[in-house]
Image (tube, grey):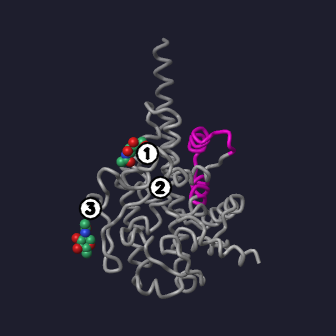
Amino acid sequence: MRFTTLIPLLSLTPAVYSWGELGHRTVAYLASKHFTRDASELVNTLLANDQGWDISDGAIWADAIRHRNGYTHTGEWHYIDALDDPPNYCNVTYTRDCKSGPGCIVDAIANFTSRINNPHLDLVQQKEALMFIIHFIGDIHQPLHTEHLSRGGNGIKVCFDAHCGERENLHGVWDRAIPHKRRALSAAESDKVILKAAAAAWAEELYLREEKRAAQCDDVETAQMCALEWASEANAWVCGFVLEKGQAWLEGNDLGGEYFEGAGPIVDELVGKAGLRLGNWLNALAAERAAAETMLVQDGERSEV
Ligand SMILES: *[C@@H]1O[C@H](CO)[C@@H](O)[C@H](O)[C@H]1NC(C)=O
Ligand SMILES: *[C@@H]1O[C@H](CO)[C@@H](O)[C@H](O)[C@H]1NC(C)=O
């Protein structure tokens, strides 16, 4: 009953722009399973506040503030608009696709990677850098965050499980409808406690079944290159599955059936990779920070002699 009464609410929920809360919270929880002690300490120190937050709350902050005063320019950082031509061909290049000026997710990742440990920034700025990183490494694994076509699919009206609401579009289906259905949640589920529990369970499953593979590109010194590589990988799925059948097919078929079945394993793979990569990324940054702190202590001791 609950399920059917919630469905109509879907049309009232605001447009979504990134992996919904479920995806982002899962990426964050999964990353934290890979943390070294230094990384846990770094995250606990920077995210600590009096609201009882955990890392998954930090993961959705960037969406919560993007329309606020002083943050409206951050909207462009959630994606890179690859000017390719799916399903004919897909590719991402920095010079063609990253708008100079507003920027894009690739340089935002590089930017905030270098800010987390920047000793000239205060803890609030470092904390924001951390929350942006946690969010953007999630987003860059959402294929439609690496595609310009119809504003990353926001303009492609679709039906999902017989719901063809005004706001139902391909981008939103990938952000939320597919992950929610895969995790047996109603599309409109927005209860924080329920979403956190679902994210923790999903992270646990992804963690247990993860082959102990290398994260592929985890050198924080080459952040921009890595981010571009991750974006290219997600973008390949735009042609490989997301828009493979063409816009007309997507608009003419309910995506809650065969399409959903095909998308599920891809979403698992991408969310899994995002979590692993975020974990390794923050481990590397935490090691860098610990090394810098050790050097400071040694310098202090030396000058006391
Ligand atoms: C993207 O791929 C297309 C088709 O293969 C090619 O013509 C184009 O040059 C590529 N663009 C870039 C910037 O690599
Ligand atoms: C880097 O981060 C700072 C602080 O938020 C911001 O002012 C600047 O525009 C950012 N640049 C890019 C390319 O993200």
The disc label shown at residue 96, or none: 3
Q: Residues within 10 Å of mark 2 (few under 14, many from 20)?
A: many
Q: Secondary structure at mark 3?
A: helix
Residue 193 lies left or right of residue 123; in this view the side is: right
Residue at coordinates 51% horizontally, 48% vertically from top-left?
Answer: 68
**Marks 1/3: CA–CA distance:** 22 Å
Q: Are marks 2 and 1 in contact (CB under 8 Å)?
A: yes
**Up-down: is 231 above or below 65?**
below
Q: Is mark 3 within 8 Å of ligand 1?
A: yes
- Kindly identify the amino acid type of the residue bearing the numbered disc 1: Phe
User: Does the magenta portion include 46?
Assistant: yes
Q: Are marks 1 and 3 in contact (CB under 8 Å)?
A: no
Q: Is mark 1 within 8 Å of ligand 2?
A: yes
- Kindly identify the amino acid type of the residue bearing the numbered disc 3: Arg
Where residue 301 appears, x then y in whole percent?
Answer: 50, 18
Where residue 39 appears, x then y in whole percent?
Answer: 56, 44
What range is drawn magenta here? Answer: 25-52
Image quadrant occupied by the N terminus = bottom right
The disc label shown at residue 112, or none: 1
Residue at coordinates 29% horizontally, 52% vertically from top-left?
Answer: 100
